[in-house]
Amino acid sequence: MEATEKQLTKTIATPRCFTPIIKCVGFACDMRCEYCFFRDQDRTKKLMSQTVLESLVQQTLANNPYSADFVWHGGEPLLAGIDFYRKALEFQSKYRKPRQVVRNLIQTNGNLINQDWAMFFAENGFGVGLSLDGPREFHNRYRHYQDGSGNYDRVMQAIDMLKEYDLTPGVVCVITDLSVGYPEKMFRFFLDNAIPIVNFNRADSVNQCGVPLPYVPSPVEFGQFLLKTFDLWVEEDNLEVKIGPIESIIHCLVSGECSDCLFSGECDHFIIVDAEGHVYACFSDGYGESWRLGNIANLDFNSAEFQSLSNKTREIREGCQTCKWFKVCKGGCLCDYELNFPLLGEKNIVCQPLQMLYEYISQKLRNFHLI
Ligand code: SF4
Ligand code: SF4
Ligand code: SF4
């Protein structure tokens, strides 16, 4: 049943820009990657109802008067089916104001992408992100189905299919113990396969009980991987090649501004919305109730929960005020603070490699007289 106008026009106490990261099928996924953040969660598909969807769209457009982003995430968001996204677009048309820019971004494992999906994404201007961990031997080791077989071939097919429709997917690549020692091999792999937009990530370092995971490179190893990748990128001298987070760091250093949430210092503006409309802090993903902020149907940015999140976001950054890189870094990502594991202490576990990166890249930029 769809929401009535009355339900959907509830006043919002304090309008404030936010970006929803939408878990429209809960933690459901057709894969069982080793490092999956949701490995111990209930993987039953919970499809977001049209009532919640309409409420989500209405609230997001009302709070972001100039431009609004919808980030469709998983589990595996394509399990929701094309009709779910057609409905989302319908609601976006219904609530969009004149000249309001609306963007849809979807992050998928690629398994379900076929001609229909590719055409749908192309026709409706979706930004598509795919998960690909580099060459077959690296990717298939940790990204696999329940039977243990990897989906490398499927992802490569998905990329080709998207290209047929003139879409350039951005790739999210998780760096593991296997790949961290091979920055050149990784860089060449993406270039040789005409994949110019890659975002390198580090897998979560602990499981949901706070126990360190074996296949995760140390923060310093990951930092060194990025340093080497930066050198390779400079040598390549091709601005079409965009490597995250290096590109964002360069933007921050050169212009002092960056659209990447990692360097925005505004983690309280990114919220997770689950299939039932519950809203959570971005970094709390998968850890349940302690950072639940309310429900999308009646968001209240003045609530105690939101205040607590804003305070936490601010407090953490206060500890960084004296850092010479604060203007660029702003304390980094709250996911890197182990906030879900108080026993580990509240410190940014990637602070050292971040400083190493800022120092190295800024020195190079000075040599090129760019800063
Ligand atoms: S594809 Fe994503 S959601 Fe699915 S198991 Fe792998 S990491 Fe988890
Ligand atoms: S917690 Fe990390 S991923 Fe989430 S908004 Fe903050 S910087 Fe971005
Ligand atoms: S580099 Fe470390 S100390 Fe400096 S702002 Fe970033 S997280 Fe804080």
Image: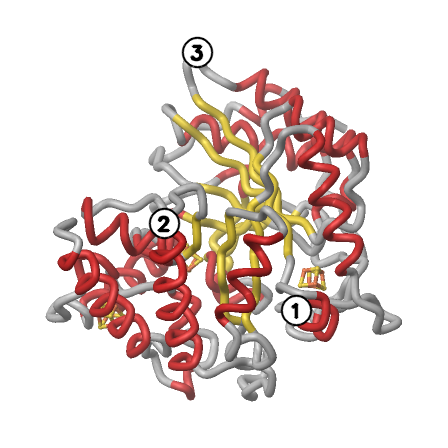
Q: Report helix, strand or loop for mark 1.
A: loop
Res 146 quadrant in image = bottom right
At 43% from the left edge and 55% from the top edge, which residue is drawn?
244
Calculate the distance from the C-alpha at mark 1 to the C-alpha at mark 3.
40 Å
Disc 1 residue type (three-letter) = Cys
The one nearer the camera, 357 or 67, is: 357
State the residue position of label 2.
Answer: 237
The quarter of the picture where the N terminus appears is top right
Mark 1, ligand 1, within 8 Å: the answer is yes
Sequence-wise first label, 2 or 1: 1
State the residue position of label 1.
Answer: 36
Query: In the image as oriented, which residue stretches furthest toward the right?
Result: 147
Calculate the distance from the C-alpha at mark 2 to the C-alpha at mark 1.
34 Å
Residue 271 on image: x %, y %: 47, 50
Disc 3 residue type (three-letter) = Pro
Mark 2, ligand 3, within 8 Å: the answer is no
Residue 40 visible within the image: no
Sequence-wise first label, 2 or 3: 3
Res 127 quadrant in image = top right
Kindly identify which numbered label has been placed on residue 320.
none
Residue 266 visible within the image: yes
Q: Report helix, strand or loop for mark 2.
A: loop
At 43% from the left edge and 81% from the top edge, which residue is drawn?
221
Q: Report helix, strand or loop for mark 3.
A: loop
Kindly identify which numbered label has been placed on residue 98.
3
Eyeballing the image, is 168 above or below 318?
A: above
Mark 2 vs mark 3: in front: 2
Eyeballing the image, is 73 above or below 15?
A: below
Neighbour tally class for label 2: few under 14, some 14-19, many 20 plus, Cα within 10 Å = few
Label 1 with label 3: CB-CB less than 8 Å: no
Q: In the displayed structure, does residue 121 sit left or right of residue 71?
A: right
Residue 65 on image: x %, y %: 38, 24
